Each structure stands twice: as structure tokens, then as C-alpha cells.
Image: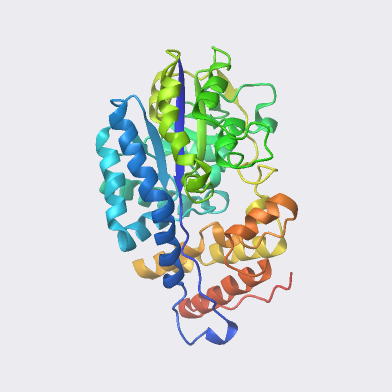
Amino acid sequence: MTQVVFYFQIHQPWRLRRYTFFDIGKHDDYFDDAENERILRRVVEKCYRPMTLLLEELIEQHAGAFRCAFSISGCALQQLERWSPETLEIFQRLAKTGCVEFLAETSHHSLAALIDEDEFRAQVRAQHDHIERLFGQSPTTFRNTELITSNQIARLAEDMGYQAILAEGADHILDWRSPHLVYRPEGCEKIRVLLRSYRLSDDIAFRFSNRAWASWPLSAATFAQWLGELPTSDEFVGLFMDYETFGEHQWEDTGIFDFMRHLPGEVLKNPRFGFATPAEIAAKVDPVSRLDIPHPFSWADAERDLTAWLDNAMQRASHRSVHGLAEAVRATGDPETVETWRRMTTSDHFYYMCVKFFSDGDVHKYFSPYATPHDAYITLMNVLGDLRRRLGVPREGLLVP
């Protein structure tokens, strides 16, 4: 039997306000709460509320045969708790169905796994506790920020007790192998890696509304037919995507909600298929072989590497500057200071500094609240300058990219 594994990512960063050089030493009001609330409420109305109610309906309609998983960053959970607790209650209802798995990740959607193991572990523990408190689940599956994975990151997740880790089914990692089988990362003894089927996932997440696409308009029956054409040896199909696919990136008038409303029924018409959560796959399916991931890779951009966040001088310097304050921040013992700093570790701040061109560049511009990547860099560095002053850490030399 081949299981379809739907995994949805939810994340909202704490965006910075326009913080200038002349604000340093004047105030520590770093975050643009008005804009953060506006964007959250917009996405709640367009995506989170209608899509989550639809999933609740599908679970009931199919008597639990439809199953899925979520990874909700700690930043997004904080914003839902603050500005839309009624929406958070819908997710909590999903948790009670027993058909929805909530995954572990870094609490602040950070790149800590690449630079600071202690901070990585601290953020994962904080997020784990947050999930337990809100949803009554102790996560057994780990999803690192933006699916950034390597042998070393998988070993860290295994050491923390996780049974599975999610990753991108990138061609340069798999070579001739299928993304629809379970593997074990090199150097690990227990943890399993479940891969994203990027072609099928992107048919929904990116190509669905493209009228120039040969398969437009895509129906649930057609997609189920594509699944049926996969080799019978496939153990699962990982359909991993941003939750904002539904209603935000693909607007309601594209038919995306109707597509999802009918897809489980179309898939379940074929007795070969069912739905499962990542934890269920990890518990039942043995790895077919080891998978060597010597260097970190992700699900972002065409390269599927780290260049979305750490490619240019601005990105690398600001990332080092943020994590260079870790020891001083932890030494304060002040939860509010730690929280403020952790919000600056969020990967989005470095994503906004990307200077790529063509389609990937357009995606970065779409998500960025800044006019230019340089504006993103200057804002973050000014904020760091003020935090450094508050911590009593000597000023860094000026970097001119």
C-alpha cells in the first residue's frame, strides 16, 4: 500500500519596524506589531481559518481515513495566541481527532543548526514544550527550518530522541533513487528521513493556477490518476508545502479549496492508497538504504541549498553578528532579552537580503517588507547595534558590502 503524506508548514516572522541609526540608544521598540498583526489577520481570513475548517470537515467525512501533519513555528504560534486565539482553537480541535500530527522544529524558525548547537537544542526543546502545551502531543518527527537537512543535523535530531526527519527530495542528493522510499541518514542508527516529492508537491503549491501550464486546470481526479501511475513499490508520497498555498498563494478563485475538498475522496477510490502522518510512516516502514547528506540542503530556490539565506556578504555578516551575541544574551538570564534576540535569529531576516535575479529573486521580493535587500540589512544591523549597546558588548567594525 502507498500512503499519501500531507505536511503543511506555517510560519510568520516577527518583522522589524524601520529602525534607523538615529534610533539607536533612543528606544528598543524593534518589532512592527501593527504590520505583523495586519498580515496575520489577512492570512487567517484567506487561509488558516477556511483551510483548517476544511481539513476538519475532511477528517470527519472520511471517518479518520484522511490524515495530515503540521509544523507551526513558535513565532506563528505566538502570533495566533495573541491576535487570533479562535483560529488556534481550530488547530487544537484537529489535534484531538488523532488524525493530525504536530511536528517539532526550532522555535524561532532559525538557522541555529548551522552555527550554534546549544542554541539549536534550546530552541527545539522550547518548541517541543510549546507543542505539548497547546496540542497535547509530544512530537516524534522533526522538521528543521526550510527543510535544511544534513547528516549532522539528522544526528542532532536523533540524539534529541526524534524518530523521523523531513527533507527535500532533491535530485542531487537522490541521484537515481526514489523520493518515495524511506532512508536512513549516513551516520545515524535509528532516525528515518522522509523526503518531499517536489514535482507533485509543486504541482499544487506553485503550478496550480498557472494558465500556461499544460495540465491547467488541475482536477483532483487527474492528480489522483498521477498518483496511481507511480510504481507500486513506492511506500509513500510526501506532499510537503507551505500552508499559505491554500488561499494566500493560490487564491480561492483558482479553485484550490475545491481541489482539496475532493482530493481525499479521489485518492481513496483506489484501494492501493491511504493517508498517513510522518510518524506513522516512520513507525511502520523500514529504511531501504542509507542516504548520504554531507552538506546541508533545503527546499528553497532552484539550487535547493543555503543561498537563499547565506549567499552574499550582507547575509553572512548579519547572521554572524546575530549569533555572535548568543553568549552575552544567555548570560543575562532574562527571558525577555532572550526572546527579543531569538526573534532576530529567524531566517526571514536573512532571506530578505537575498540579491538573486529571475524567478527566485521575484519570490524573495514578494515576501520582503523592504524596498531593497540593503534596507533589510541596515535595519537588522541597526537593531543589533542597539541590542549590543544594551548588553554592553563592544561595537563591531562597520561592514560595507
**Residue 95 x, y percent position in the rendering:** 29, 39
How many labels sit on residues?
0
Measuring 44% from the left and 78% from the top, which residue is drawn there? 29
Task: Judge whether 346 appears above or below 160 on screen.
Answer: below
> Can residue 334 be spotted in the picture?
no
Question: As rendered, which of 336 and 2 lies closer to the eye?
Answer: 2
**Residue 351 x, y percent position in the rendering:** 61, 58
> Can residue 222 be spotted in the picture?
yes
Task: Judge whether 100 appears above or below 358 on screen.
Answer: above
Left or right: 240 as drawn, with respect to 62: right
The quadrant of the image that shows the C terminus is bottom right
**Residue 333 x, y percent position in the rendering:** 36, 67
Measuring 27% from the left and 55% from the top, which residue is drawn there? 86
Task: Judge whether 226 appears above or below 173 on screen.
Answer: above
Question: As rendered, which of 123 and 167 lies closer to the eye?
Answer: 167
**Residue 72 x, y percent position in the rendering:** 41, 48
Measuring 42% from the left and 72% from the top, which residue is drawn there? 34
Measuring 53% from the left and 43% from the top, which residue is drawn there? 254
Question: As rendered, which of 239 and 101 lies closer to the eye?
Answer: 239
Question: Coloring scheme of the render?
Answer: rainbow
The quadrant of the image that shows the N terminus is top left
